[in-house]
Image (cartoon, rainbow, N blue to C red):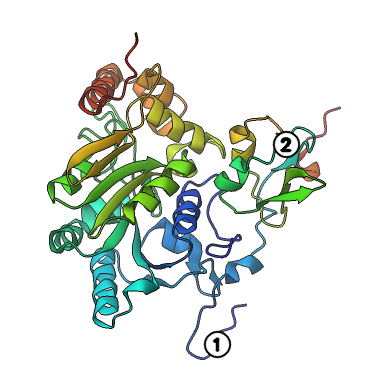
Amino acid sequence: MIEITIGAISRPMEAKKNKTGDWGTEYPIVDVEKCSGCRSCEMFCPDLCVEVVKENKKKYAVFNYDYCKGCGVCAFVCPENAIRMEVKEIYKLEVE
Amino acid sequence: MKYFSSGHGACPGCGLPIAVKNVLQALDGKCFVVNSTGCLEIISSQYGKSAWGVPYIHSLFENAAPVAAGIEAALRALGRKDEGHVVVFAGDGATADIGFGCLSGVMDRNHDIIYICLDNEAYQNTGHQQSGLTPMGEATTTTPVGKLMPGKLGKKKDMVSIAVAHGIPYVATSSSAFPADIRRKVKRALEFEGTKYIQIHSPCVTGWGVDGKGGIIAAKLAVETGLYPLVEFEYGKLTRVRKIKDRKPVEEYLKIQRRFRHLFKHPMGKQIIEELQRIADENARKYGLDVEKK
């Protein structure tokens, strides 16, 4: 239900409450050892859910799965091949 | 990022947010965004779900450029020029078809704005109808493939040459597959006074018929085959191009997309592919894209 305020004012960055993380069928996993923190994925990610963090002089990418739609662009552009796409548990077909 | 937020409604792998976030990053958020009707408006400005962190206005399909010109004139009249640049984000239909006359007028008056055309090569928001920037041979809902028609018959409108012909200070093309290139070109555009036109090739996953990462792969191949040359014009002179090492045949770009797959079995398909290859060769010759072998 949309709540309409007086004057129907739209606030900035309200899209954050729209959790798009459940759209995709896949999700990216970062190999922290391989990741060089080059920010390629951060630059490309259409859903702006990558952040490069620094920990003990080691830089690596961290994904926000609340918003990731699982497009796989990050895995394609990664120069170190440090990102792989994994199918979500609920979409895995059971093969007997 | 403070200027464009997650949670917008774009398809997975869409090229528009990649272009938009890199433009806003290059401008450090110091801008007033004017948006024409199109996919970008739909995905980012639903009521209560606005993704923008910068001032944003949407008016109509055809008048994004004059609205931006009005904002620029108002800022100038009020002495608030240093508050930010006026940036237009418009789709290819809003640029080359519907808003073409208005854009021409703004370029003629040389208002100090940055006009960014997000070129996904059809009206993808309403369901993939052909626009002026649709390339030859593309199957759209208004140029369907049948016994007689092999998709769109006309050529892609050369908006870059049209913009250059207006005598504006800066014209460039870029691609969502090269975000660093987008940032550099937007920063370069800021150095000029007058209308700046940047055309960004941004893939549409549903319209082009590719999977999530396929959009970026296709956009990259468009540059590597010479069908979408990345060029820069300053005051009408070609100043910089992205050179291509070992230019690929256009088939590599065409075969991965659903919108071109009929070309490989349609009786007129071979002719269209040859014509597209000729366009790519023509681009390479015109802009000097190939790296000369020693």
Q: Secondary structure at mark 1?
A: loop
Q: Chain of mark 1?
A: A
Please say if B275 is above or below B62. Answer: above
Please say if A39 is above or below B53. Answer: above
Picture quadrant of residue B285? top left
Give the left or right position of residue B156, taking residue B46 as reference. left
Name the residue carrying label 2: A35
Query: Considering the image in quadrants, where does the C terminus of chain B appear?
Result: top left
Q: Residue at x 59, y 71 (%)?
A: A14
Please say if B15 is above or below A14. Answer: above
Rate crowding at label 1 as few (under 14), some (14 to 19) or many (20 or more) other CA atoms within 10 Å: few
Q: Secondary structure at mark 2?
A: loop
Q: Is residue B35 visible?
A: no
Question: Is mark 1 in CB contact (under 8 Å) with mark 2?
Answer: no
Query: Please, which residue is most extreme toward the right here?
Result: A96
Q: Residue at x 32, y 42 (%)?
A: B173
Q: Residue B118 location, x and y as percent?
A: 37, 50
